[in-house]
Image: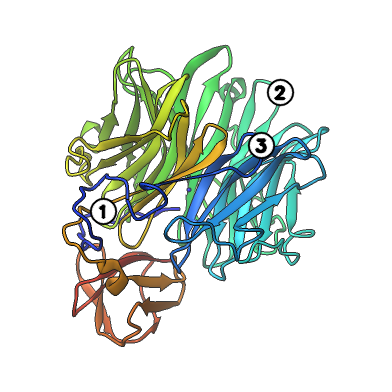
Amino acid sequence: MKKILLTGFMLSSFFAFSQSAGSLDASFGTGGKVVTSINSGADKAYATAIQADGKILVAGVTTSGATGKDFAIVRYNADGTLDTAFGTNGIVTSDLQGGSDDVAYSMALLADGKIVLAGYSDDGSQKKAAIVRYTAMGALDTDFGTGGKVYTSFEGTLASEIKVIKVHLATGNLVVGGNAAVSSTKAKPVIARYTAAGALDTNFNTTGIKTLWLSTNDQQYQMTVEDLVVQANGKISAVGWEDFPSLPWDSDYWLCRINSNGTMDTGFSGDGVNVLNGTFNGHDRAYGLLLKDDNSMVVAGGGYVTDLNYSATLFEITPAGVAAGTSSQSNIPYASLNDAIAYDVELDNDGKFVMTGSNGTAAAKTFAISRVNSNYTIDTTFDTDGKVTTAFGSNAVSEAFDAAIQPDNKIVAVGYTGNDFAVARYLGTAATSGTDEFAKNAINLYPNPAGNVLNIATADAGANAYTIFDVNGRAVIKSKATSLNIENLQGGVYILRFDDNGASAKFVKQ
């Protein structure tokens, strides 16, 4: 999960073939889909990232009879074939503690190409939060933690787990969100910060760990952080949910904002936390987060919109921590008696919101991708009704948990089908010609997010003139440099557009 929001800026169409936005990309895998079996047991992908060279990283968990659940990473070439130069035939698995159950929920791709996975490791005596760093080629990075691994008990000796990990580019710090159990039915939401080397950062809340039961009332709930964004100034915005254990369908959206030193940001809802009920006041959960330039939150998840329809939801929270109102929200119901949920939200290159999740029943589910305009109306240019579902062969159950937007606006969604990793790629822009414009117009901006220097690489490697625009469409830099000093740019989202052919790409300045 990753995100800062750009609104109101349209980019060019890159790709070919006479297909509409939302169609599966026929140039990827088989008919737009790839299924990978790692071991004989259940494999699930929870996270994805796109490298600067267009290769696709997918991470999650694999299960075998020999070692149980293990961290897993698969790297695919841009066409969906396995990248055999990575790990063993494109696959890396890690049994962290010798037979422990290890699940990776989140992934961060570092500027130097290293890969960080986060989740939990359970050796049978204690379930600990786990972070593992790999080299760009998939080997454990022994410069991180102990042998590439870091384990943390957030509170006491009960279970701890990480659901999301992000990198603060300015410092290299790793910021994680998750939960710490206090009983079999109750848990605290947790934010923790680590140095780039894997040590807890004691400049954050003196211990590096912030648990977020803030009142006596909180102590009756099971709570967790599901996603977060680290602002350029180090503040942390996070979302998740709280469940009342004795009423399993009584849950609420949970949101918070924390200062860079670990104190609560009291400018957000008075005490740094807000809890919200959805439209129908039942089983409301937040899983995905974007942050707008004014620090408003865009939150994705699920909630009942009637007593029969559980819907993927999207809504906005103001910088002050209150709901922005019905004009800044959208519900995506699929079919009566079906449950639709969004586990992730991404910003595409046209400033639209792409939600990724699942639709169906417990016995029959599919990938579910929906797109919403920046004004929260359904984007009817995306498969005519703003949503698509994707099944994988004869498997009855498939779910998507994460997505990434390519520079050409294609959408890569990852999850599982049956017992295997599943990846699908969709067109984000209607393709209108028969030539592969991406080959000519592809732009790689790196690192992204960027600090003081932005590198620009194009397919033709030419020194063509380009212009950088801010979110209001103002030109802020004109250059031909392939390595550009952007130290004086304010933190935020920018578009780089080439003057000759209009090819564009988005980057974030931290």
Residue 236 seen in render: no
Identity of the residue drawn at 31% across and 61% down: 408
Q: Secondary structure at mark 2?
A: loop
Q: Quadrant of residue 40?
A: top right
Say which amino acid is labelled 2.
Ser
Nearer the observer: mark 3 or 1; the answer is: 3
Give, as a three-letter code, the residue at label 3: Ser
| Observer-nearest of 453 and 366 | 366
- Residue that numbered label 1 is attached to: 351
Tally the numbered discs: 3
**Residue beneath the point at 32% across and 70% down:** 442
Q: In terms of sequence position, does the residue under pointer 3 or pointer 1 come before the other? A: 3
Residue at point 43%, 61% (across, down): 78
Occupied quadrant, residue 386: top left
Nearer the viewer's eye, disc 3 or disc 2? 3
Which-is-in-front pick, marks 1 and 2?
1
Q: CA distance from mark 1 to mark 2?
A: 43 Å
**Is residue 12 visible in the rendered structure shown here?**
yes
Q: Is residue 426 left or right of residue 152?
A: left
Residue 320 image offset from top left, x and y in percent: 36, 43
Say which residue label 3 marks.
Answer: 40
Badge 3 element: loop
Q: CA distance from mark 3 to mark 1?
A: 41 Å
Q: Say which element carries label 1.
A: loop
Cβ atoms under marks 3 and 1 closer than 8 Å: no
User: Vertical placement of 127 versus 349: above or below?
Assistant: above
Question: Is there CB contact under 8 Å for labels 3 and 2?
Answer: no
Q: Position of residue 361 (x, y in %)?
A: 42, 20
**Tag of residue 183:** 2
Q: Residue 452: where, in percent of width, then height?
A: 45, 77
Where residue 198 appears, x then y in whole percent?
A: 70, 59
